[in-house]
Image (cartoon, coloured by chain):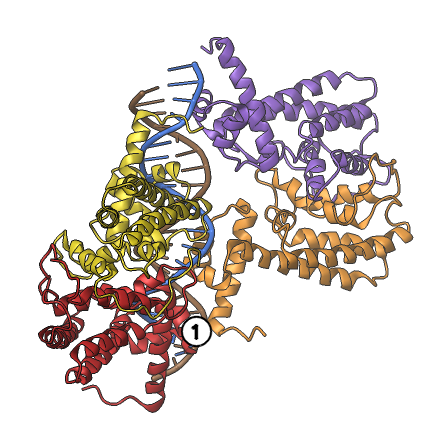
Chain colours: A yellow, B red, C orange, D purple, E blue, F brown
Amino acid sequence: MTRPLRADAARNRRLLLAAAADEFAERGLEASIADIARRAGIGKGTVFRHFATKEDLIAAIVLDRVEVLIEAGHDLAAAADPGAALREFMTVAAEQRQQRDLSFLHEANAGREEVSRVQTRLRETIDALVDRARDQGAVRADVTGTDVFLLMCAPNHVAGYQPDAPPDLWRRYLAIIFDGLRPEGAHPLPQPAPDARG
Amino acid sequence: MTRPLRADAARNRRLLLAAAADEFAERGLEASIADIARRAGIGKGTVFRHFATKEDLIAAIVLDRVEVLIEAGHDLAAAADPGAALREFMTVAAEQRQQRDLSFLHEANAGREEVSRVQTRLRETIDALVDRARDQGAVRADVTGTDVFLLMCAPNHVAGYQPDAPPDLWRRYLAIIFDGLRPEGAHPLPQPAPDARG
Amino acid sequence: MTRPLRADAARNRRLLLAAAADEFAERGLEASIADIARRAGIGKGTVFRHFATKEDLIAAIVLDRVEVLIEAGHDLAAAADPGAALREFMTVAAEQRQQRDLSFLHEANAGREEVSRVQTRLRETIDALVDRARDQGAVRADVTGTDVFLLMCAPNHVAGYQPDAPPDLWRRYLAIIFDGLRPEGAHPLPQPAPDARG
Amino acid sequence: MTRPLRADAARNRRLLLAAAADEFAERGLEASIADIARRAGIGKGTVFRHFATKEDLIAAIVLDRVEVLIEAGHDLAAAADPGAALREFMTVAAEQRQQRDLSFLHEANAGREEVSRVQTRLRETIDALVDRARDQGAVRADVTGTDVFLLMCAPNHVAGYQPDAPPDLWRRYLAIIFDGLRPEGAHPLPQPAPDARG
DNA sequence: AATGAATGAGGCTTCATTCAT
DNA sequence: CATGAATGAAGCCTCATTCAT
């Protein structure tokens, strides 16, 4: 189908995706294509040769990210300690973008067919991790995979509010949030968990 | 200096701030001045008579919000149950914008003198609440006011990722995060709390 | 509905429509908005205040033109000499744009609801003129209003091929084409007249 | 100088010219080189190997077309019936592009040396046809070769305005225009014929 | 010689901001 | 004071053209 890119084109594609991810992480989705191209050291037009649309570019990054998460989730699905596995998963998720956060993973491309599909797969992966952890009593009985899916980005986001945060600050907030998921000291939750799909 | 506005001007200012807050909540900071003006039922030029700059308008909203929070914090500072008081404070914070989140309270106007000043006051207010709660053992020993300041917006933000979330979903995530702040089942935190000022 | 424009806005609108008509006449529909704005002596943004879209601008011009033609057609519908009336109508049509031609009156906005509607009215107007002329024997029996509708732009278009044509050259080709519509020396036509609507 | 092309290059050139002619006929001169290349089944770069510029490509097509017309004109110059010969010539001209029209034969390349030269030769060819026809009384006394040169494209152009015209509709308008060139029922023309060269 | 990747100028459009009414 | 018209910078995207493979 997609025959291998020419060597230079492949290199540019990589540069572009990296630059775009960085710009989006630093400035949000309104980062301009021109800035992304400049950062990647390529021409503006080249961006559009690789991704016909800004949205396509964003979708490609999201897909990349989510695929990595799914893989990480699968690798952890059979780990000896389900609680540690879940926490490791959330760590991997947060590590992906130590700068700012990967919120746009949620915000963008609401409608995109491919994105929804891969998000569904990610949710299922997370469900499996959470179910196992819950069965073992590693997390409280009333949290679901959807909760983790939604909370996953919070550590980075929260840390991003601190003006000159040390690069690992998110680990602090991941720890706090994860403690909130533990059974010890859990108080009843006032709202039911949302459905997988809205 | 700032002599009282004429009656209609004061009314317009209120309409404008309300409309702007709603638009920003629904569409984010990139909501257009034209839409805000239309929503407020006033002319675009009038917006700029009240706020010379879009940033000024945003700052005004942030200031409004923060003042309310400071006041709420003060009111709760002497409450009988410090733990409940802190939780109530976080609830008030999250309630301010049940739609979307008030992240832009952090994101915007990083540099603004007035905003920093009022943020400092808010931090101090929160510090007081947290200190009291910590002293009573209502929250874990290793969390600070800054932590709460940063975590405060997370419940709304997290809930916002869910496509058609029920309007009170944020309460679920506030509960989880608050449980993470409790002493029961607290695990040591990998990173120290950030300074008050970066 | 459309309350009267402010004096300066109305003036700009006129300048803009005139400049646009000239540019389109000289360079075709691919004339750029920037050039049109410059020619009108207004800012590029002002063009979009008046017409949200380049297509809207084109449609406005077409509508203008066609309305004038319909009116002219109505005025001529009761003229004493139906043959002269039809010829006068075609003259008025060709005079509208002495430079180049008004072909884009046909080419543009195929789909636009308002444009189709007004075109239908124009066709009906022309039908009436042609029917009367035919009844009187002023034009050959086998031509229809649709023929005239289609031929109407040809004189200007043909004259436009001549590099430095005198401004009235189109009159020569209108005369020739009109002679082709007369009954004298008419030879049978190899193809039937097209339908009013495709 | 222009040594013969390699066999495959010659083949590509033919494919390219045909594809370009079709695209231009369907979409006008703003058809993109990329689409033309795709239609020809060759790479975009190859287009520029054959024609350094889009304008060069257009000129080549025009030259092609005009050469064919000149040849046809020569073949018809000695025909038994000069009136029928002229009409046949105009038919051949219109047939070249039954889709859309060959207006761009006039519109493009105004300045090109080679194009002007070949256009001059075409005009002379047409002059000869018209002169003979006029001498025989097959066309009116006051029309010239230049008139025919200019009118030649009108049938296709006129028919092109009709949305879903049958492919031979242009024959109808050629017939009408040709009738306008006949002596019977000719009325005096209001403008003199233009010079051969502007 | 052929290919298709890269480039950047230029086109349409949006929007914060200024200014005449 | 309020209004909405005008402006131009900036954004996304297209496309002729150049160039490395």
| Rendered view: A149 above or below D131 | below
Q: Would you say residue D187 is visible in this rendering? A: no
Q: In which quarter of the image is the C terminus of chain D?
A: top right
| Rendered view: B141 above or below C197 | below
Work out which residue is located at the far right of the displayed protein and give it.
C136
Q: Name which residue lies at 87% across and 56% down.
A: C132
| Rendered view: A90 above or below B61 | above
Q: Quadrant of the N terminus of chain D?
A: top left
Q: What subunit carries mark 1?
A: B
Q: Is C140 left or right of A58, judged from the image as shown?
A: right
Q: To which residue does mark 1 refer?
A: B38
Instruction: Please tell me how crowded label 1 is: few (under 14), some (14-19), or many (20+) other residues with Cα within 10 Å.
Output: some
The image shows residue B47 at horizontal and vertical percentages of 34, 75
Q: Name which residue lies at 38% across and 48% down.
A: A124
Tell me the amino acid under the disc marked 1: Arg
Q: Is C20 left or right of A106, judged from the image as shown?
A: right
Q: Would you say residue C134 is visible in this rendering? A: yes
The residue closer to the viewer here, B143 or C120, is B143
Q: Name which residue lies at 22% across and 74% down.
A: B87
Q: Is D192 left or right of B129, judged from the image as shown?
A: right
The residue closer to the viewer here, C71 or B86, is B86
The image shows residue B82 at horizontal and vertical percentages of 16, 79
The image shows residue D142 at horizontal and vertical percentages of 76, 36
The image shows residue A34 at horizontal and vertical percentages of 30, 46
How many numbered discs sit on the rendered protein? 1
The quadrant where residue B14 appears: bottom left
Q: Is mark 1 on a helix, strand or loop?
A: helix
